[in-house]
Image (cartoon, helix red, strand yellow):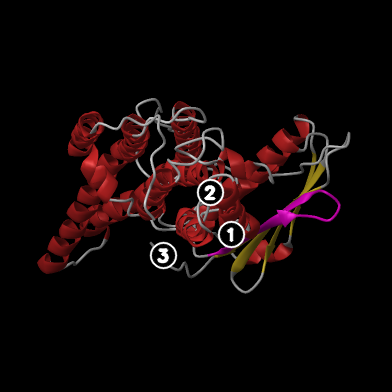
């Protein structure tokens, strides 16, 4: 189509050439500094809002793009043909080139811009000789609407430098077109540039806010995981410090027996006496290493505890202490427990600590409730059960259910049961209370997995 310039357009070739030269020079300077950002698009080709967990949110960009294209193509054809006097075939070609790329903007907005921007410039050239007052120029309304949707997609995906480069190219192209073709009336060059910049800034701000919220959520998850890991390590160190006394006791007995064997047993051959001496030396060396390990596990704030580690014999005292704290507690010990004989110290210590932690959390989270502690034995295993009723006054949390958040209730119980190769079952009761059930092997302790 051959353009016919109105009388108001300068007829001298020199004026047009100078204006075009100035615009191209400014455009060249901008492209020289920001050109790579216009060529290299974001490596993320996932659909916009594709990371949402809701399906309708993920499908929303496709729906908006399809509705925009379906609306702007017929509207653009009619508007270009009736208001700007462009022939129907050319109007259809321009409308399609300016709108269809919006479908690709959902995943590759910069590639869509490389199609829509030349189409917008071509539309400005094709409508320059229309009567003044027919509509805004060089941006018809339908072209501007589609371009603004594309700017929003770019702002949600591309980097800040790319957005700046796109805006500068848009501004220079608009200014260059206006300088090359003087058109009386109907001009609207500055407004589209301002609107494009506003949409880019708004979209970039929304994108930055979304990324900040995503990073904050990830940091909270990392902090929660680190807090749980730190709690677990602290609990394991506490258990290791307690078991130190148990193991140290046995090692001390071995040392004393090995040292005194040559004096207690008469007629020992020299080889046997030497062997007992070697055993005693190895035991003393093991005790020294254990003390070094305990020094590493013990924090600077903690002080050594010289009292003997508790066992089953101190559970009645523990139940009485809880009763004085406002929780009615009852203890039941089956006769089969006595038939187990003397329990290993690790089992007795773990039993005491499990009951202690369970009752402590009953006092903390279900004050005024009633608790029952029972010890039973079956098939060389010790069964520990702590059950409490729902707290009065309409409280919703019972027992140690809330102790999971503190990190030293259920975590400590699980670690102790795991250490002895037993089983632990915890959970709320239908009436609002809570139940803790542990099974600890007595004679054969399995090695806990690492």
Q: Position of residue 49 (x, y in %)?
A: 53, 52
Q: Is residue 328 above or below residue 109?
A: above
The residue beneath circle 2 is 85
**Mark 1 element type:** helix
In the image, what residue occupies the spot 32% across and 54% down? 43
The residue beneath circle 3 is 449
**Mark 3 element type:** loop
Is 79 on the left or on the right of 6, as rendered? right
Q: Is residue 80 above or below residue 326?
A: below
Q: Which residues are magenta?
A: 422-435
**Mark 2 element type:** loop
- Of badges 2 and 3, the one in the foreground is 2
Task: State the image quarter where residue 34 is shown.
Answer: top left
Whether residue 250 is in magenta: the answer is no
The residue beneath circle 1 is 66
- Looking at the image, tell me whether mark 1 or mark 2 is earlier in sequence order: 1
Q: Position of residue 213 (x, y in %)?
A: 51, 37
In the image, what residue occupies the spot 46% across and 27% down? 184
Task: State the image quarter where residue 275 is shown.
Answer: bottom left
């Amino acid at each position: 189509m051959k353009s016919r310039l109105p009388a108001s357009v300068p007829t001298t070739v020199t004026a047009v050439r100078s204006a075009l030269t100035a615009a191209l020079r400014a455009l060249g300077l901008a492209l020289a500094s920001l050109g790579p950002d216009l060529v290299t698009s974001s490596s993320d080709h996932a659909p916009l809002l594709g990371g949402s967990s809701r399906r309708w949110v993920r499908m929303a960009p496709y729906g908006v793009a399809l509705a925009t294209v379906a609306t702007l193509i017929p509207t653009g054809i009619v508007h270009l043909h009736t208001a700007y006097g462009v022939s129907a075939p050319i109007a259809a070609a321009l409308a399609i080139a300016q709108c269809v790329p919006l479908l690709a903007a959902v995943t590759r907005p910069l590639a869509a811009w490389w199609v829509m921007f030349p189409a917008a410039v071509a539309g400005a050239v094709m409508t320059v000789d229309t009567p003044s007052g027919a509509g805004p120029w060089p941006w018809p309304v339908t072209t501007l609407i589609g371009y603004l949707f594309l700017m929003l997609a770019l702002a949600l995906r591309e980097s800040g430098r790319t957005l700046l480069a796109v805006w500068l190219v848009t501004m220079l192209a608009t200014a260059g077109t206006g300088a090359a073709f003087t058109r009386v009336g109907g001009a609207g060059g500055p407004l589209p540039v301002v609107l494009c910049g506003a949409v880019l800034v708004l979209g970039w701000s929304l994108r930055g806010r979304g990324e900040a919220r995503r990073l904050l959520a990830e940091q909270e998850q990392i902090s929660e995981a680190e807090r749980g890991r730190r709690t677990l390590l602290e609990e394991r160190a506490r258990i290791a410090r307690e078991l130190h006394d148990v193991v140290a006791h046995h090692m001390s007995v071995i040392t004393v027996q090995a040292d005194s064997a040559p004096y207690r047993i008469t007629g020992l051959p020299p080889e046997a006496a030497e062997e007992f001496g070697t055993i005693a030396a190895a035991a003393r060396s093991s005790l020294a290493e254990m003390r070094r390990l305990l020094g590493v596990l013990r924090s600077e704030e903690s002080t050594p505890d010289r009292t003997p580690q508790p066992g089953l014999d101190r559970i009645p005292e523990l139940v009485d202490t809880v009763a004085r704290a406002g929780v009615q507690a009852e203890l039941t010990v089956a006769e089969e427990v006595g038939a187990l004989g003397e329990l290993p110290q690790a089992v007795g210590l773990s039993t005491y600590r499990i009951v202690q932690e369970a009752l402590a959390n009953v006092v903390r989270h279900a004050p005024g409730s009633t608790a029952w502690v029972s010890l039973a034995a079956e098939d060389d295993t010790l069964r520990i059960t702590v059950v409490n009723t729902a707290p009065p006054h309409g409280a919703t949390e019972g027992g140690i259910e809330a102790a999971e958040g503190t990190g030293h209730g259920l975590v400590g119980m699980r670690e102790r049961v795991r250490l002895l190769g037993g089983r632990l079952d915890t959970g709320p009761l239908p009436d609002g209370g809570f139940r803790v059930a542990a099974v600890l092997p007595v004679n054969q302790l399995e090695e806990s997995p690492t």
